[in-house]
């Protein structure tokens, strides 16, 4: 069993870590304060192949494997969770869906603009008002999963109404909005796959999306650990760094251990997405473990920094707000437990 990265994966990881450190981290606090979608950062990310990581080169993507994609999202999330989730949605839930289920004219129309950062994708579970293309599901037939179809809706089309920008606790610049449709008519060319295949397309998209969220969560958790370690080494109490005290050490040990375990599940799920026909359970396990480990890490970091972390504008305060969403979107922790339990019971 090989646990080390390939030379190509390691090189890509180092490249993205440098971009995250030099460009994304510099903008993270301002993005959070303003709540404005960071279009310039997304454009810069596209220059590093981050807007179409796994999309084949023939369609303008970087053509990389899923482990490389997960490592990239983790590195970006360590700097800015908002930028990471924007990239995750564009990659996992839009570009990959079009590459997997789209027709050639849909791939030709959208994959290159998405990969170049000229268009942003939106997934109509929680959508953005900056999207150029939106993946939408609608009932076209009988009740149940077999009656659902998948469509591509271009921004600005008549009948599409975009609601107000929701003022969220965290991930403030990821622009979550409501969508409504009034007498919206689409041509047959907007259908992705065949009629009635929409539910399967959605489930396949979420398998990849949940790997992306697991990677985002581990990145946030590792950023919280970094902040806690730095503070523990610098903060003096009773004549010595608080890192010397067992209570602090135990919190740091728990954070590091739980994040390492979650990270292994995340990488396993990324590998499964690449090598298996179906990776639903692996993706659910990774998202569940990573989101909850990251939440605990942010909470413990807040405890270690105390008032320095609780202040508005501190890095840990931002991480604490951002991480909570990872246990909610693309399937709550409760939903992931249902998926995992169903598999355990079916195979037990």
Image (cartoon, rainbow, N blue to C red):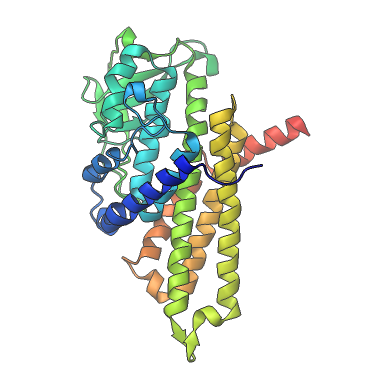
Horizontal and vertical percent for residue 270?
53, 37
Q: Hey, which residue is sitting farthest bottom in the picture?
A: 239
Instruction: Identify the residue shown where x is 44% and y is 55%.
Output: 220
Of 192 and 114, the residue lying toward us: 114
Occupied quadrant, residue 253: bottom right
Q: Position of residue 310 (x, y in %)?
A: 39, 70
Could you tell me which residue is drawn at 23 percent across and 32 percent down? 118
Q: Say whether residue 240 is left or right of residue 109.
A: right
Height in image: 292 above or below 306? above
Residue 333 visible in the current orientation = no
Question: Who is closer to the viewer here, 32 or 335?
Answer: 32
Against 252, residue 192 (above or below) is above
Residue sitting nearer the eye, 125 or 183: 125
Q: Horizontally, is 332 left or right of 105 in the view?
A: right
Q: Between residues 86 and 137, which one lies in front from this camera angle?
A: 86
- Which quadrant of the figure contains the C terminus? top right
| Residue 57 on image: x %, y % | 36, 25
Name of the residue lying farthest toward the front: 7
Going by the picture, which residue comes out furthest to the right?
348
The total number of labels drawn is 0
Q: Give the x, y percent position of residue 186.
A: 30, 13
Using the rendered image of the protein, determine whether residue 262 is visible from the camera's viewpoint: yes
Q: At 26% across and 55% down in the image, what residue appears?
A: 27
Q: Quadrant of the N terminus?
A: top right
Q: Is residue 265 above or below residue 206?
A: below
């Amino acid at each position: 069993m090989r646990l080390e990265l390939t030379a190509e994966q390691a090189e890509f990881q180092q490249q993205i870590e440098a971009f995250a450190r030099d460009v994304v981290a510099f903008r993270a606090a301002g993005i959070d304060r303003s709540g404005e979608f960071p279009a310039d950062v997304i454009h810069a990310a596209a220059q590093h192949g981050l807007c179409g990581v796994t999309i084949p080169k023939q369609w303008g993507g970087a053509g990389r494997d899923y482990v490389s994609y997960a490592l990239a999202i983790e590195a970006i999330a360590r700097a800015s969770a908002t930028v990471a989730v924007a990239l995750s949605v564009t990659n996992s839930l839009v570009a990959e869906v079009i590459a997997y289920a789209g027709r050639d004219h849909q791939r030709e129309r959208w994959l290159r603009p998405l990969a170049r950062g000229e268009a942003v994708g939106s997934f109509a579970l929680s959508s953005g008002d900056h999207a150029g293309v939106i993946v939408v599901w609608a009932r076209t037939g009988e009740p149940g999963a077999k009656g659902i179809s998948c469509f591509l809706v271009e921004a600005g089309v008549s009948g599409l109404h975009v609601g107000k920008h929701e003022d969220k606790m965290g991930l403030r610049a990821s622009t979550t909005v409501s969508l409504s449709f009034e007498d919206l008519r689409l041509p047959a060319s907007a259908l992705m796959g065949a009629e009635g295949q929409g539910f399967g397309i959605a489930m396949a998209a979420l398998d990849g999306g949940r790997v992306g969220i697991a990677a985002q969560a581990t990145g946030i958790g590792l950023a919280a650990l970094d902040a806690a370690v730095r503070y523990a080494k610098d903060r003096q109490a009773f004549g010595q760094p608080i890192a010397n005290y067992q209570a602090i050490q135990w919190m740091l040990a728990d954070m590091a251990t739980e994040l390492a375990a979650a990270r292994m599940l995340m990488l396993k799920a990324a590998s499964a997405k690449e090598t298996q026909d179906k990776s639903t359970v692996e993706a659910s396990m990774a998202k569940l473990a990573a989101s909850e480990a990251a939440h605990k890490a942010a909470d413990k970091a807040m405890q270690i920094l105390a008032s320095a972390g609780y202040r508005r504008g501190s890095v840990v305060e931002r991480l604490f707000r951002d991480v909570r969403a990872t246990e909610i979107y693309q399937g709550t922790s409760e939903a992931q437990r249902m998926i995992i339990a169903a598999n355990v019971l079916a195979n037990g």
